[in-house]
Image: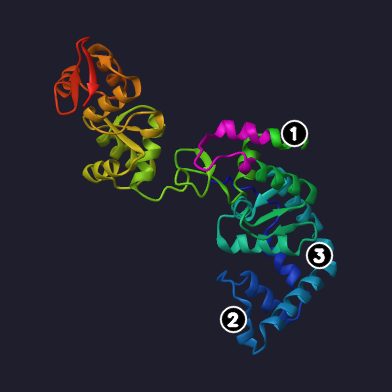
Amino acid sequence: MAEKIQLSFKPKTIVKRLLSVLTKRGQDVIENRYGLGAKGTRMTLDAIGKKYDITRERVRQIENHSLALVRKSKEYKDVQSAFDELKAVVVSLGGIVSEKDLLKHLAKDQATQNQVNFLLVVGEEFIREREDDEFTHRWHADPELAKKIQNALRKLYSRLSDDELVVEGDLINTFLEEVKDINEKYKNEEVIRRWLSISQKIGKNPLGEWGKTDSPNVNAKGMRDYAFLVIRKHGSPIHFKEVAKAISQYFNKKAHVATTHNELIKDPRFVLVGRGLYALAEWGYMSGVVKDVIRKIIEKEGPLTREEIVKKVLKERYVKENTIMVNLQNTKFFKKDKESKYHTV
């Protein structure tokens, strides 16, 4: 949760003073557009147009004219210290910050956030960049810094492979390599995390790992994706009952044991390596039952002795040696030659 920054002024008081320079209709349009009324509700250009029986384009003209009048007014100059303070906040948060994050730092309630947002809009030192495919809505007061950070985020994204997951510390270090020439005051983990949150293409999963937001490893949508992340975090084979428990713990999703087991069976990302124990296929474990594993080992290595087969199978499966021996004795699939080495049939 964002820590609230205490302003020395009351946004509501400053806004009221600035709007006093406008006509009644100008005030009404601005209040409705920016949610500055008692209810804090914002209205669209069309809705305001219907209220006054004018076109949405005419409403836009009134809005722009009203903002211009405020900026040219004596009242605007008289409250310059408030804008200076807001600029200092933007700089302290990293120089470029997402709109959502900035407003959360400055106010908890929607009404006050709307008032702060209006001050940012009318303040000539602030630049708002609209949300697009790459970045979320963001504010800054330094175009050069903003450009550097956005370019660095693009480069960071290009260095990530599609389903790669990176621990936060490593990602921060990589990002710092891309912004070596920025002011040292910005080079701390809190600011870097704030910059990362601007990106629409890089995100963090509930386990704190970063990657591309279009990857199921980051934007997990179902039980199988949750299970994959849980097993990956565990780092070694884990029982499906423990997987279900961890899904509930990490993702706050109700995970039934039987359902979890069924989903693991269906997905090729998972390999059953023992009684109820699952590993990730990407770890190199062979798929299939013990018989299939023996077959694949012999096909890859050539004829092997019983001891060699047991040793290699135990690297792939958490089973008893006797289970391997029982499978080897199945003459439908394996045969032993004169040198006591096993072949596939």
Instruction: State yes or no: discs 3 and 2 in contact (Cβ < 8 Å).
Output: no
Q: Earlier in the sequence, mark 2 or mark 1?
A: 2
State the SS at label 1: loop
| Observer-nearest of 342 and 255 | 342
23 above or below 326?
below
Residue 169: in magenta span: yes
User: In the rendered image, which residue does mark 1 sit on?
Assistant: 180
Q: Residues within 10 Å of mark 2 (few under 14, many from 20)?
A: some
Name the residue located 38 percent from the left edge and 39 percent from the top edge. Answer: 228
Q: Position of residue 19 (x, y in %)?
A: 73, 72
Q: Earlier in the sequence, mark 3 or mark 2?
A: 2
Q: Position of residue 168 (x, y in %)?
A: 55, 34
User: In the rendered image, which residue does mark 2 sit on?
Assistant: 47
Q: Earlier in the sequence, mark 3 or mark 1?
A: 3
Q: CA distance from mark 2 to mark 1?
A: 48 Å
The residue sitting at the bottom extreme is: 53
Query: Which image quadrant for residue 193?
Result: top right
State the SS at label 3: helix
| Observer-nearest of 61 and 296 | 296
Provide the residue span drawn in magenta: 156-176
Q: CA distance from mark 3 to mark 1?
A: 38 Å
> What kind of residue is marked 1?
Lys
- In the picture, the disc for residue 329 is none
271 above or below 97?
above
Q: CA distance from mark 3 to mark 2?
A: 28 Å
Q: Is residue 179 left or right of residue 301?
A: right
User: In the rendered image, which residue does mark 3 sit on?
Assistant: 76
